[in-house]
Image: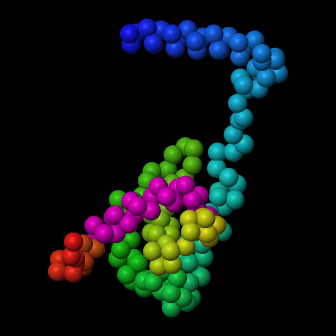
Amino acid sequence: MESLVVEACSILSGVLAQQLNQRLTESDRSMLKSRKKRRWWVRQWIQKRKSNGGSMFISRELRNENPEDFKNILRMSDTHFNYLLNKIKFKIQKMDTTMREAIPADTKLKLTLRYLATGDSFKSLEYFFIVPKCTISLFLPEVCSEIYSALAEFIEVSQNNFKF
C-alpha cells in the first residue's frame, strides 16, 4: 500500500512539473536559471573597520586620553581589560583567510563588554563597531563563554538562593 502511494505521488509530481514547464515562457525559464549574483563579498563600509570602527575610537581616543571614559563605555578599566584579553585572546581569535581578515580578539571583547554593559541591539552595535549583526550573533556567545571560563575562579554562586 505504501509503495503504491509513493508511486502515485511521483507520477503526479512528474505530470505537474511537465504542465508547469509548458506554461513557462522562455523569459521565465531564463529568469529561473540565472541567479542574482552577489554584488560584494563584504560590504564596503565594513571593510573600513580598521580606520573608522568604534573599537579604534575606544583604543585611540578613550584608552590613551580619557581612561575614565574608557571605563565608562566598557565598564572596565584598561588594566582589567588587558588582563581579560590576555586570558581569552587565543581562544576567540580566528585565522585570516584569503577572502577576508578575521575580526581581532580585542574588537570582539570590546563589543561583547559593550553589549553586556548596555544591552544595545545588535543593529546599533553593528554600526558602532562596524561588524555585521549576523557575525555578532555568532561570536558573542563564544566570547561570553570564554569570559566565564577565564573568570570562573572569581565567580561564586550561592546554592541557597535558588528554590525550585
Q: As drawn, is 130 to the left or to the right of 154? A: right
At 17% from the left edge and 80% from the top edge, which residue is drawn? 160
User: Toward which corner of the image does residue 6 lie, by quadrant?
Assistant: top left
Image quadrant holding the C terminus, namely bottom left
Q: Is residue 122 above or below residue 43?
A: below
At 45% from the left edge and 58% from the top edge, which residue is drawn? 139
Image quadrant holding the N terminus, namely top left
User: Toward which corner of the image does residue 23 lie, by quadrant?
Assistant: top right
Q: As drawn, is 19 to the left or to the right of 86? A: right
Residue 61: give x, y in percent of width and height.
59, 82
Give the magenta part as a residue range: 130-150
**Magenta span: chief secondary structure:** helix
Q: Is residue 64 visible?
A: no
Residue 117: give x, y in percent of width and height.
47, 79
Q: Is residue 8 above or below residue 121?
A: above
Residue 14: give x, y in percent of width and height.
60, 11
At 59% from the left edge and 58% from the top edge, which residue is drawn? 132
At 69% from the left edge and 40% from the top edge, which residue is drawn? 38
Q: Is residue 137 magenta?
A: yes
Residue 29: give x, y in percent of width and height.
76, 20
Q: Is residue 81 above or below residue 47?
A: below
Marks counted in the figure total: 0
User: Toward which corner of the image does residue 162 lie, by quadrant?
Assistant: bottom left
Q: Is residue 11 visible?
A: yes
